[in-house]
Amino acid sequence: MEKDLWYDSFLEMLNEQFPKKSQLIEALMDLLLLEREAIYRRLRKDVLFTIYEVATIARAWNISLDNVINNIPGGDPAFRLKMLRCVNPTAKDLKMMKDFVDSLSSLKDDPNAEYIEVCNLLPRALMSPYTYLAKFYTFTWQYRYGGEKNTASFSNTIPSEKMREFEIAHFNAIINIPNVHSIWDAQIFQYLVNEINYFASIYLITPEEVNLIKQDIYAFLDYMENVLIQGHFPETNNKIHLYISRINIDTGYACYYSDKIKASKIRTFVMNVTVSKDVRLFNNLRTWLHLKKRAAIQISGTDEKRRIDFFRQQRQLVDSI
């Protein structure tokens, strides 16, 4: 019945928190101080969670009741901000990251699956194998959004091992997607160089650290140039199409889909993403992202001169740091 749609949406949110039913039941028993059978009855909809119980769950597990209502079919599209602690992630952060990587990893089994992104920062997944380059973006997040420690130096920014594991898993998930389309802002390396120069000028990055970051950028450029010459990732032979936008890009957008999943995301706060699984929104965003190619130059595939010129210009930029 239509009046039950909000409850189904609420149950869906609970299942996202604990994909394993046994874990969900145990967590609800501990939170609500109810017997196991009482929890089963609520999950089967024999009886409904009371308003007090819904409020208790939403408060404890940071569930937006606005999103519960908006998640009802026919409702307004709902974005969900996934704000992570990027240096020392909590258990909840790690679960969110794992869920995200798992959803991307599921695309590898569908030959028609696609990932398309538009970005003005280097794609987080592709730069993940480069330790100092990846750490630089973690450092910039810490500087901007790290609260009391926002003046921490590059040296004192130490991402956890779990975060590094997520970054490598993110890279592996992307290169295993059968079709990847990436559209970069033409100034993407200029923005990076500007930031490195700034933080070096205020002594938050030492000259030795700058050199380590530069070496990672050179290695990233070498890898990407080799990938684009071949037109696919050498590790998996999956296709990648890279475009350079002729117009500025304001932030990062992406969508991905297979026969089982459709999702959209917008990058926020350097390293966080706002996610939606609304199908109508996905269809509109996917169309818009593909249309961005009209104002872009493809440098993957056969256009050898443009590709050579692009990478030569980026290496000259890095030389200037």
Image: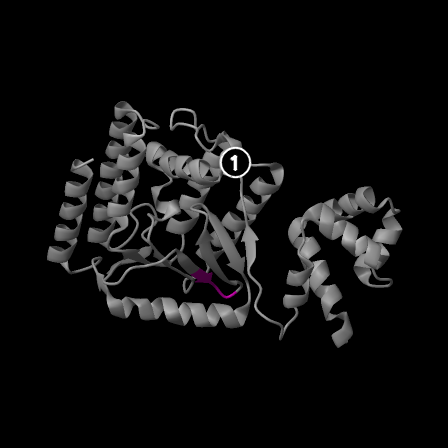
Q: How many labels does the image show?
A: 1
Considering every residue shown, the one lying at the far left of the view is: 305
Q: Name the one closer to the observer, 76 or 241.
A: 76
Question: Which of the 4 image quarters holds residue 135?
Answer: top left
Q: Mark 1 points at which residue?
A: 147
Task: Look at the picture and state if 117 lies above or below 151.
Answer: below
Task: Tell me if I can see residue 25 in this picture.
Answer: yes
Image side of residue 172 versus residue 31, left or right: left
The residue range painted magenta reads: 255-259
Question: Which of the 4 image quarters holds residue 49?
Answer: bottom right
Q: Name the one closer to the observer, 292 or 140.
A: 140
Going by the numbered disc 1, the residue's amino acid type is Gly
Task: Tell me if I can see residue 19 in this picture.
Answer: no
Give the image location of residue 161, x and y in percent: 49, 30
Image side of residue 97 versus residue 108, left or right: right
Image side of residue 187 versus residue 316, left or right: right
Q: Residue at x 25, y 41 (%)?
A: 193
Give the image location of residue 267, x and y in percent: 44, 53
Task: Look at the picture and state if 262 lies above or below 176.
Answer: below
Give the image location of residue 284, x and y in percent: 45, 72
Task: Look at the picture and state if 112 lies above or below 161.
Answer: below
Question: Which of the 4 image quarters holds residue 40?
Answer: bottom right
- Whether residue 257 appears in magenta in the rendering, the answer is yes
Q: Which residue is drawn at 54% across and 61% down?
A: 276
- Please, what is the dominant secondary structure of the magenta stretch? strand
Image side of residue 86 versus residue 202, left or right: right
Give the image location of residue 66, x and y in percent: 66, 62
Q: Which quarter of the image is occupied by the C terminus?
A: top left
Helix, strand or loop for disc 1: helix
Q: Name the one closer to the observer, 203 or 256.
A: 203
Task: Look at the picture and state if 37 lies above or below 87.
Answer: below
